[in-house]
């Protein structure tokens, strides 16, 4: 579930296409990328938007004084991936966090709850490491 754009317009489109309950009811592995990850949460400050509510928590804008959007390479654990974003996810429970990154503050850059996975970075723009992440997700998701 890739994402580029704003939370409010994306959620509006999902409502119009009647996809919200379809997505929430999925039992197959689901991967949200960037905005796609953010939409998994309850609420986004971007446009004061109610999101899918799959992962409890909210999406916040980086603090004043931070250069936004964050554009470029940053690490998740020991690997580097490509980021482009102005907002970051704050899960209510840390048990959903599978990766973190530092950009002015330590933030959640990867999540998982049940069959729902999210990545704040863009694996499709992250060279070999991004390809590895996508390949591992696809391999693990084979039914």
Image: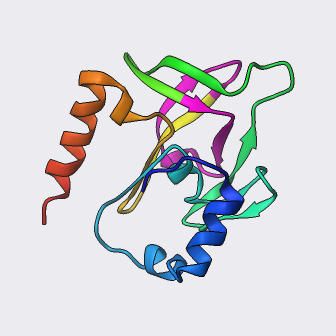
Q: Residue at x 43, y 35 (%)?
A: 122
Front residue of 14 and 31 = 14
Give residue 34's position: percent from left, percent from top: 52, 43
Residue 102, placed above or below residue 22: above
In the image, what residue occupies the spot 54% across and 66% down?
A: 54
Count the labels in the image.
Answer: 0
Residue 94 appears in which quarter of the rendering? top right
How does the figure colour the protein chain or chains? rainbow
Q: Quadrant of residue 48?
A: bottom right
Quadrant containing the C terminus in the rendered view: bottom left
Quarter of the figure with the N terminus: bottom left
User: Eyeballing the image, is 114 above or below 110?
Assistant: below
Say if the magenta span includes residue 93. yes
| 26 versus 103 height, above or below | below
Name the side, left or right, on which 130 lies relative to 68: left
Residue 113 among those drawn in magenta: no
Q: Main secondary structure of the magenta part?
A: strand
Residue 67 lies in quadrant: top right
- Residue 4: x and y in percent read 55, 47
Q: Position of residue 83 (x, y in %)?
A: 52, 28
x and y percentages locating residue 105 in the rendered image = 69, 22
Magenta part of the chain: 84-106
Of 77 and 28, which appears nearest the observer? 28
Left or right: residue 83 versus residue 68 is left
Residue, x 67% and y 56% (percent of image)?
7
Residue under the point 54% across and 77% down: 20
């Amino acid at each position: 579930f890739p994402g580029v754009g704003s939370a409010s317009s994306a959620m509006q489109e999902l409502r119009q296409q009647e996809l919200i309950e379809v997505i929430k009811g999925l039992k197959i592995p689901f991967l949200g990328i960037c905005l796609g990850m953010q939409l998994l949460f309850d609420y986004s400050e971007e446009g004061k938007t109610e999101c899918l509510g799959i992962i409890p928590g909210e999406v916040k804008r980086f603090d004043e004084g931070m250069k936004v959007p964050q554009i470029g390479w940053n690490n998740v654990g020991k690997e580097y991936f490509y980021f482009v974003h102005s907002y970051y996810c704050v899960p209510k429970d840390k048990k959903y966090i599978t990766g973190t990154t530092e950009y002015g503050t330590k933030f959640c850059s990867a999540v998982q709850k049940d069959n729902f996975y999210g990545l704040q970075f863009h694996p499709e723009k992250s060279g070999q490491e991004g390809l590895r992440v996508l390949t591992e997700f696809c391999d693990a998701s084979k039914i």
